[in-house]
Image (tube, helix red, strand yellow):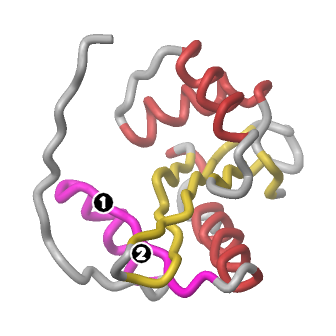
Amino acid sequence: MIREINISDAEEIKKICKTALGYDVDISTVENQIKKLSCDNKHHILAVYEDENTRKVIGFIHAQVYESVYSDTGLNILGLAVDPDFRGNGVGKKLIGYIEKYAMDNGISFIRLNSANHRVEAHKFYENIGYKCDKLQKRFIKYFNI
């Protein structure tokens, strides 16, 4: 079952981030981000997939409205992850379907996402559900001590 994210999901999201994505994030960061981002439903769409039998969160998706002066409004998927023990059961496809429905219901013309070069299985998943790689690029980042 797909539902909106809530703060009680933080511990499971933390675990999924580590096991599925390799991001060992602090629980306070996850809690703070859920609190902040879930209040901004005009720009952030956050949902979890909860196993109907165990009521355990086994996947999540996070998309952000993408706007620029050179394109129509789109969605940028910032995170999609499924507990590795539950992959291959259609959870990721259902989460993507949830975001696609949101896009169509809200007049959003495209969805885009980035996926690291080494995530070959993820690339196959996206291609199998109709997404196409349209460019390769480098990411540049600068951190600030705050």
Say whether marks 2 and 1 touch (CB < 8 Å): yes
Residue at which label 2 appears:
126
- Amino acid at the residue labelled 2: Tyr
User: Magenta segment range?
Assistant: 108-128
Most foreground residue, 118 or 53 = 118
Residue at which label 1 appears:
115
Is 135 left, or right, of 37 in this rendering?
A: left
Residue drawn where x is 44% and y is 30% of the image: 18
Q: Is residue 57 above or below residue 43?
A: above
Q: Can residue 110 be found in the magenta stretch?
A: yes
Residue neighbourhood size for the residue with mark 1, other residues' Cα within 10 Å, grouped as few (<14), some (14–19), many (≥20)? some
Give the x, y percent position of residue 107: 68, 85
Residue drawn where x is 48% and y is 84% of the image: 72
Residue drawn where x is 39% and y is 66% of the image: 113
Q: State the separation of the CA atoms marked 2 and 1.
A: 10 Å
Q: Can residue 98 be found in the magenta stretch?
A: no
Residue drawn where x is 52% and y is 77% of the image: 73
Give the x, y percent position of residue 64: 55, 57
